[in-house]
Image (spheres, grey):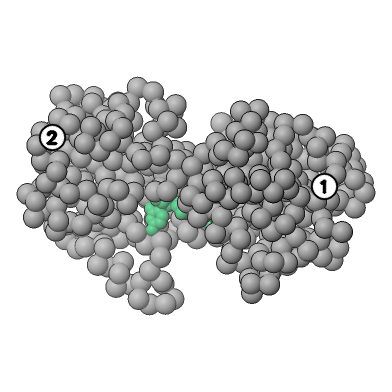
Amino acid sequence: MTLKLSVVGCGYLGATHAACMSSLGFEVVGVDTDPRKVELLSRGELPFYEPGLDTLLEQEMKTGRLSFTTDFSAVADADVHFICVGTPQSKDGLAADLTYVKASVAAIAPYLKKGSLVVGKSTVPVGTAQALRAELSLSAPDADLAWNPEFLREGFAVEDTLTPNRLVVGVVNDRAEDILKEVYQPIIDLGTPWIRADLPTAELVKVAANSFLATKISFINAMAEVCEAAGGDVTVLAKAIGYDPRIGNRFLQAGIGFGGGCLPKDIRAFMARAEELGAKQALEFLREIDAINLRARQRVIDVVRDELSENLTSYTIAVLGAAFKPDSDDVRDSPALDIAAQLQAAGAKIIVHDPKAIENARLRFPALGFAESVHEAVKGADLILHLTEWREYREIDPSSLEALVKGKIIIDGRNALDRDKWRTAGWKFHALGRSN
Ligand code: UGA
């Protein structure tokens, strides 16, 4: 008999997982405490922007296999329960806030039938799975718990779920592994590497991967700082070192650094957990990774001041991009919005444009100015900041903005624009890590 699945938490991760598992042929119920989210998803509409997921969701809702509810008792029928809730940074420190993970497991515990498997997908501090499994053995002794970290990137969520570059499962026994193999069989059949680990290793794989990615970005941003000081060009440097396959050219895009709901909070939570474990020194370097990352934001602000004035009160700045990266409407810890807010706090008038993230940006920073189009955003601007590398911005014809702006100055915070194109059109063009 085919397994039935439940997915607890229907944000970027959970909604994607639910729709993708339905597309593999499983009956899936998604549970979320937010009635607005559930209502939208039940109508086949996404509460956020994720390319390709909208059509997949619509298609899966029509099959009748996929449903969403706020009622936790709906999981009673399912054999496998995926925990996909958020683990944000806690309000009072670096550690991850596990409230939602703990609450989710507690909420489904009364409904777990004999032999069912709870599978954590959320990013958690190492040791969480073992503790949850011990708790579950008291509240639902007939159920088991495994950990199956998720590596999906926003913007590529469907692709990363259905064709991931590896599947990692943390299990305590063969039975749990067998159940997960049954769920993921179509993906395993594609030749996807399957890694069985113990619970702590599975949890660590996730934070280690994100820490490595963060380190790569901060490494190239540190090189950008040195390039600026020494008269070099970080884009050429990145290209040149990237040809060494041991280094690789991906994730070496210098600019205003990493943001989002994962990398920043994951490296901080990892440091906090290592300290608890008595391994603080091993992850001290992540403090520097974080510091380099935040410094990149400050460096853009410094260039703005150099170009305009120390006192920004009489200046208007157009900000292109609010999302933490392109192809997403996520503004959590967005470097672009942080820079916009800091410049506004320094007295500048800020007008932000983003193809998808304006609504979320407005909720977070209601006092910023917002524009529906690039042309509207740059009207009367003394300077343009390019802070999220949407394709739309790369396609701008610089001469089309000429009559609208007050000053023909652009700072490329993502090293993604065509410098020659802008300079040929008579613009003063700056980019992080490129001295000339
Ligand atoms: C990240 C990881 O890439 C996923 O593998 C992981 O599953 C996910 O976190 C998670 O933990 O859930 P995501 O947050 O969607 O995915 O975004 P990334 O594509 O990793 O980008 C993170 C940030 O780094 C963005 O702000 C991006 O603009 C920045 N970045 C990325 C750079 O500044 N330079 C680069 O070369 C690459």
Is 423 on the left or on the right of 412, as rendered?
A: left
Query: Which residue sits furthest front?
Result: 62
Q: Which residue type does callout 2 highlight?
A: Leu
Q: Nearer the viewer, residue 401 or 382?
A: 401
Q: State which quadrant residue 207 falls in.
A: bottom right
Marker disc for residue 404: 2
Callout 2 secondary element: loop
Is 116 on the left or on the right of 333, as rendered?
A: right
**Mark 1: few/some/many CA within 10 Å (<14, 14-19, 20+):** many
On the image, the x and y values in percent for residue 79 come to 83, 51
On the image, the x and y values in percent for residue 170 come to 73, 60
Q: Nearer the viewer, residue 359 or 87?
A: 359
Q: Which residue lies at the image location 85% right of the left edge and 44% below the top edge? A: 77
- Name the quarter where the N terminus is drawn: bottom right
Q: CA distance from mark 1 to mark 2?
A: 58 Å
Tell me if residue 268 can be seen. no
Above or below 321: residue 351:
above
Q: Which residue lies at the image location 61% right of the left edge and 49% below the top edge? A: 59
Above or below 413: residue 169:
below
Tell me if residue 55 can be seen. yes
Q: Which residue is mark 1?
A: 78
**Mark 2: few/some/many CA within 10 Å (<14, 14-19, 20+):** some
Assess mark 2: CB under 8 A from ligand 1? no
- Name the quarter where the C terminus is drawn: bottom left
Above or below 195: residue 220:
above
Q: Which residue lies at the image location 23% right of the left edge and 32% below the top edge? A: 376
Query: Which residue sits furthest top?
Result: 367
Callout 1 secondary element: loop
